[in-house]
Amino acid sequence: MKTRLNEKNQENLEDKTLNIITERVDDIPLLIGMMIKMGLPEILDKTLPSHWKQRSLSWGWTITIWLSYILSTGDHRKVSMETYVCEMKNTLTRLTGQEVEPLDFSDDRLSHVLTHLSKPKYWDKIETEVNTRSIEVYELPQETVRCDATTVSGYHTVTDTGVMQFGHSKDDPGRPQLKLMTGALDPMGMPLATDTVSGEQADDGLYIPIIERIIASLNKPGLLFVGDCKMSALAIRSYIAGHHHFYLSPLALVGNTASFMSKWIDDGVEKDKQGELEQVFRTNDRGDTVLAAQGYEFERELLDENLDAYKERVLVIHSPNHAQQQARGLEQRLENAQQKIEALTPARGRGKRQITEEEKLAAAIDKILKSHRVADVLEIDYEKQVEQKTKYVGKGRGSKNRKRQTVEKVRYQIIRVRRCEDKIAEQKQRFGWKAFATNVSGERLPLKDAVLSYRNEYRVERIFNRLKSRLNIAPMFVRLDDQIEGMTYLLMLGVRVLTLTEFVIRRSLQADETGLPDLHLENKKKKQKKPTAERILSAFLGITLTVIQDRNTGKQMKHISPLSAVQCEILQRLGLNINIYQLLEN
């Protein structure tokens, strides 16, 4: 941001030849420093093609500067960049060592960047190079990979071959969407590979392509792939096992698993009564040790026409919290069903429609029971009520000799809705059970570690959360398919920067058994042991660069806001030059 003195203040200067500019630096040096350490400008320059008439600022530095703006402001619109660069020219030129001009970030030039990123031949190579560099520089563990998919909705026009299509969505089914599939390195949740496909596709067919790319990128045997029940398809499990890697996922309740699950639960209930279930404990946020799960396991042999038979462990796990949640859901469904059933036969009165046919009442009750899934645990009693009324035949006033007739009015009344408490108790006893499949040996991944490992699946979900909150991927301010895909990949690079920043800080704090102070406005003395990347960046808000320039000679004086102790500590723990901000004064 540039700030110039107004006319009155300018007149107060003795020589009236000074021009004062203020630029909001904030977290830009930190972000650019992280991307330089990740080797992002170098990798992008080496991978993306350049034209011989291209402007002097390379694609690598163009993307690096654009990403720093997006990560700092959450605004990915191309139209904002020229104004931003114009107001930050001194800072960006000094940080990058490049001559940065607003024309380097014109709409056309940024569109070319997104087009290049959208092409698999460039994007796949960029991901592989960034993975290799990040793992080497930050000594990241390479044992567990988590895979998952999400959807991104937008206000786009749907075409037959377009990436934006209508499909199943938890966000907004009424808008077209694209589907994003990613694999993330555990425990930091850093994206390793990302694919964008049209929004109508199912998740099942996206796992093998992303797993294949991750295997090729890491080039390391014995990886453990963790995913949800959609990854448990036999073809996916066989593919992972056939390439000498491992998997862990809950089994979907379809096919043979659906028929086997009842017996597995029966065995689990019996083992629970005998005290034979292995218990899994964990420490909650309050520091208390609580029972997280309990279960048992058995081994079976799997046959695949493309593979030799191999052993698979089935872990049958009971979660107390999940069982309680299901029990609450059952109680709520019972209550709602009872209210709706009783409302079928209201008392006689004006506007109260009565059911006069038994078939209609039975059909209505059956529909409610099935929709609330309580047909086996509710019993309904109803009766036929007949009201007889004598009236004169024909019109007019009655008389002694007029004929009379008896009219019957029939209605059905529900008199009792009974809960089958024995059946309800039996159902609740079978709540909370889930079966997992893995081909990892019990020595490497015991039952306890398998349960706790799967429960860290939220780490890959944080990628999607950052895309939709911090980076505001939706709505997406581009329309063409190549621009949509390129923008998605660009923002995924941004997620990598945030993830690595957070992981490196947390690992450093854990090693020193300490925390960062001064990150909470409401409590300056509180030390944060696991600060998020967002909170770390917010610690740098308010840092400004002031440039005083002599209009006649062109000489400049620069001043940067002094860094606080916590800001210096953050830079040091990230392995960045502590003087990265002071260098802006030179």
Image (cartoon, rainbow, N blue to C red):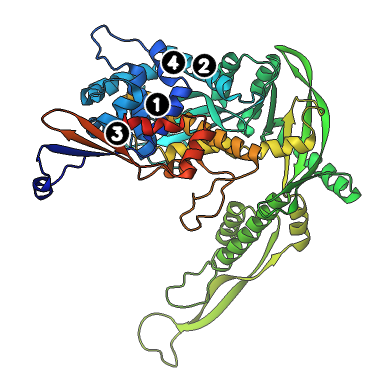
Q: Is residue 199 visible?
A: no
Name the residue beneath numbered marker 1. 490
Marking on residue 274:
none
Alpha-carbon span between mark 2 and mark 3: 27 Å
Dot 4 falls on a residue whose secondary structure is: helix
Amino acid type of the residue that numbered disc 1 sits on in the rendered structure: Leu
The crowd level at tag 4 (other Cα within 10 Å; few <14, some 14-19, many 20+) is some
Q: Is residue 58 visible?
A: yes
Dot 2 falls on a residue whose secondary structure is: helix
Q: Position of residue 440 (x, y in %)?
A: 76, 25
Pair 4/1: label in front: 4
Pair 4/2: label in front: 4
Amino acid type of the residue that numbered disc 2 sits on in the rendered structure: Thr
Q: Is residue 321 above or below residue 384?
A: above
Name the residue beneath numbered marker 2. 128
Q: Of residues 348 and 217, which is closer to you in this image?
A: 217
Pair 4/3: label in front: 4
Residue extending farthest front: 14
Dot 3 falls on a residue whose secondary structure is: loop
Name the residue beneath numbered marker 4. 43
Alpha-carbon span between mark 2 and mark 1: 15 Å
Which tag, 2 or 1, sits closer to the chain's start? 2
Residue extending farthest bottom: 400
